[in-house]
Image (spheres, helix red, strand yellow):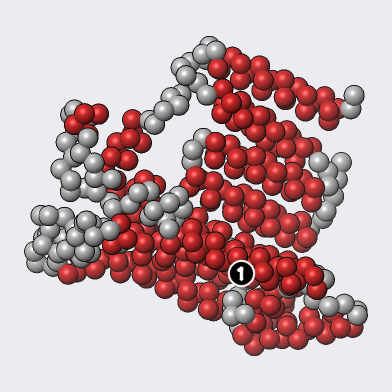
Amino acid sequence: MSKKNLVITSITLTSIVLGLIISLGVLGPIPLTSIRPLGLFYALFMANRNITIEVFPLIVNPGNFWAASTEAITAILWDYRGLDTLFETSVFFFAIIGSIALFRFTEKEEHEIRKKTHENHASEGKYLGLSLITKTITKIILFTIIVVSAAIALHGQLTPGGGFQGGSAFAVAPLLAIAALSRFYLDDIGFKKNTMLLLRTMGLLIIALLAIIPVVAGIGSWQAYIMQNQPKEWAIIQLFPPKGLGVLLGSLVYYNIAELLAVGAGFTIIFILLSIPEEFYKKIIEKEGVEHG
Amino acid sequence: MIPILHLSLISIVLTLGMVFAYLAISERDLLKAIVYSAGQAAMYVIAFYLLMAPDIVLAYAAVGVGVYSAVMIIAVKKTERYEKP
């Protein structure tokens, strides 16, 4: 028996024994298999149900705190804990600004590397990317990935999913394109670095505007809320249509679309920058060093 | 009543995840190690799904299997494929 098989067998045995011990309740109580109380609490508030009186006698649901979302995670992320998510998105935004500043090039230099790569491949008798069959299949898959990611984000307030999930699913598309079709294909279909930069800035701006609009509209009245989702009966500013008209009418869906733009475009920029050979950046930085002494 | 099938599926999937993690650590060919790591992420995706966390599934599948492996492959491409003993 080789060492590898021995280790794998011992891992399996340990996990079986540990599983038995835990399921017998030796290490402590077994977690609930029904809906947990906190989850039930949020689910009730989300759906604006008034049966809290039966389940939680001490908590009264006045019907004013509902998020108009059947998806608890999205409601918590963008309504109850909206500011947390806003700052989280900002952190991601600034992290990518750092890498853009590190890997910098102009459009002229980008054109140069394109020409040089094509020349190199032509001299070696090779073509860019994988075989024709792979390329065709990849193009079809690219389309489906983008559609699925849009569906994840746009249905975020109804079914599991949301802006970040949709954005990170979207990011797989440019990755596949770089691997199978070369990075120049991304340029050709419009996934340019500057376009992506514009899209993600737009995403964060939309989030910021949506958060601030109710406050700006309510200046002087002291009755407006930052990141207001559903109308409050005691607030003068009723930004989004009143409840009862449907679950789409809150601000959650717009936040999800903006987050999809910010995350998807941000990841795409990273992959575009990483796919450029290092010698290229070294040359640019050396040139800058000579120019600035 | 504890749903035995559900719990045993979770334990099988997590054990497989642990085996994949061991293989990823012990493998000297780094490209293979990345594939094992992606396998471990896939097992965790199934475990999260069984634990009724569909939002985590969506984010973890894209980041753990797709983005993470790709970034690691780029790193291997820019350095060396085989780990020195």
Q: Looking at the image, is B8 positioned above or below residue B58?
A: above
Residue B8 lies in what quarter of the image? Answer: top right
Which residue is located at x 51 percent, y 13 percent?
A25
SS at badge 1:
helix
**Residue A151 at x, y percent in the picture:** 49, 61
Question: Residue A283 or B23: which is nearer the viewer?
Answer: B23
**Residue A86 at x, y percent in the picture:** 37, 58
Which residue is located at x 61 percent, y 69 percent?
A143
Q: Is residue A194 visible?
A: yes
Question: Residue B27 or A181: which is nearer the viewer?
Answer: A181
**Residue B33 at x, y percent in the picture:** 77, 45
Q: Looking at the image, is A110 positioned above or below residue A277?
A: below
Question: Residue A2 or B53: which is nearer the viewer?
Answer: B53
Q: Is residue A99 visible?
A: no
Q: Is residue A115 left or right of residue A249?
A: right
Mark 1 crowdedness (10 Å alpha carbons): few <14, some 14-19, many ≥20:
few
The C terminus of chain B, quarter of image: top right
Which residue is located at x 72 percent, y 25 percent?
A11
Which residue is located at x 41 percent, y 28 percent?
A34
Residue A181 lies in what quarter of the image? Answer: bottom right
Q: Amino acid type of disc 1? A: Phe
Q: Is residue A5 left or right of residue B7?
A: right
Q: Looking at the image, is B74 positioned above or below residue A160?
A: below
Q: How many marks?
A: 1
**Residue A21 at x, y percent in the picture:** 59, 14
Q: Which residue is mark 1?
A: A143
